[in-house]
């Protein structure tokens, strides 16, 4: 069996896509766990038990290394009847920030 250069290119491309997908899946799990923890600390409920990718980019971390920057949106509720949006930002696998929209406090 003889491989041409284009065959190797496509195999490498597929490998890189699968590698990125696998890494992105792990980062999303980290983001979801951090979001759940933050919602519990803020005494709000994460709705739909999910987050959704809003955007991604390549940025440098504090050490100067290139990392993927990802932004995820999620919905939360303070009393079960309302719905607000939140956002979590991740650089590499490090949580940069978690933000919640201004919301009504229920106690």
Image (spheres, rainbow, N blue to C red):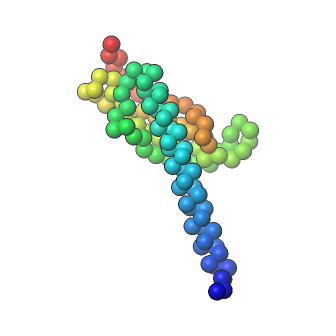
Q: Looking at the image, which residue is at 54% across and 46% down?
A: 26
Q: How many marks?
A: 0
Q: Looking at the image, which residue is at 74% across and 42% down?
A: 64
- In the image, residue 90 lies at what x, y percent? 56, 39
The answer to whether residue 102 of the structure is visible from this angle is no
Residue that extends furthest to the front in the rendered view of this protein: 1
* The quarter of the displayed image where residue 76 is located: top left
Residue 60 sits above or below residue 10 on the image: above
- In the image, residue 45 lies at what x, y percent? 36, 27
* The quarter of the displayed image where residue 106 is located: top left
Residue 2 sits above or below residue 81 on the image: below
Q: Quadrant of the C terminus?
A: top left
The answer to whether residue 78 of the structure is visible from this angle is yes
Q: Nearer the viewer, residue 12 or 52?
A: 12
Residue that extends furthest to the bottom in the rendered view of this protein: 1
Q: Nearer the viewer, residue 49 or 65?
A: 49
Residue 60 sits above or below residue 21 on the image: above
Residue that extends furthest to the right in the rendered view of this protein: 63
Q: Quadrant of the N terminus?
A: bottom right
- In the image, residue 66 lies at what x, y percent? 69, 47
Residue that extends furthest to the top in the rendered view of this protein: 107
Q: Nearer the viewer, residue 19 or 53?
A: 19
Q: Looking at the image, which residue is at 43% across and 26% down?
A: 39
Q: Looking at the image, which residue is at 63% across and 79% down?
A: 6
- In the image, residue 65 lies at what x, y percent? 72, 44
Question: Is 67 left or right of 29, judged from the image as shown?
Answer: right
Question: Is 38 left or right of 20, judged from the image as shown?
Answer: left
Question: Is 2 left or right of 86, judged from the image as shown?
Answer: right
* The quarter of the displayed image where residue 40 is located: top left
């Amino acid at each position: 069996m003889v491989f041409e250069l284009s065959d190797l290119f496509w195999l490498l491309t597929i490998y890189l896509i699968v590698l990125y997908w696998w890494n992105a899946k792990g980062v999303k799990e980290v983001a979801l766990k951090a979001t759940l923890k933050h919602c519990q600390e803020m005494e709000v409920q994460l709705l739909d038990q999910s987050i959704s990718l809003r955007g991604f980019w390549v940025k440098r971390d504090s050490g100067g290394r290139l990392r993927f920057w990802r932004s995820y949106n999620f919905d939360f509720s303070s009393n079960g009847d309302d719905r607000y949006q939140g956002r979590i930002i991740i650089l590499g696998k490090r949580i940069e920030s978690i933000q919640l929209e201004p919301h009504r406090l229920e106690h």
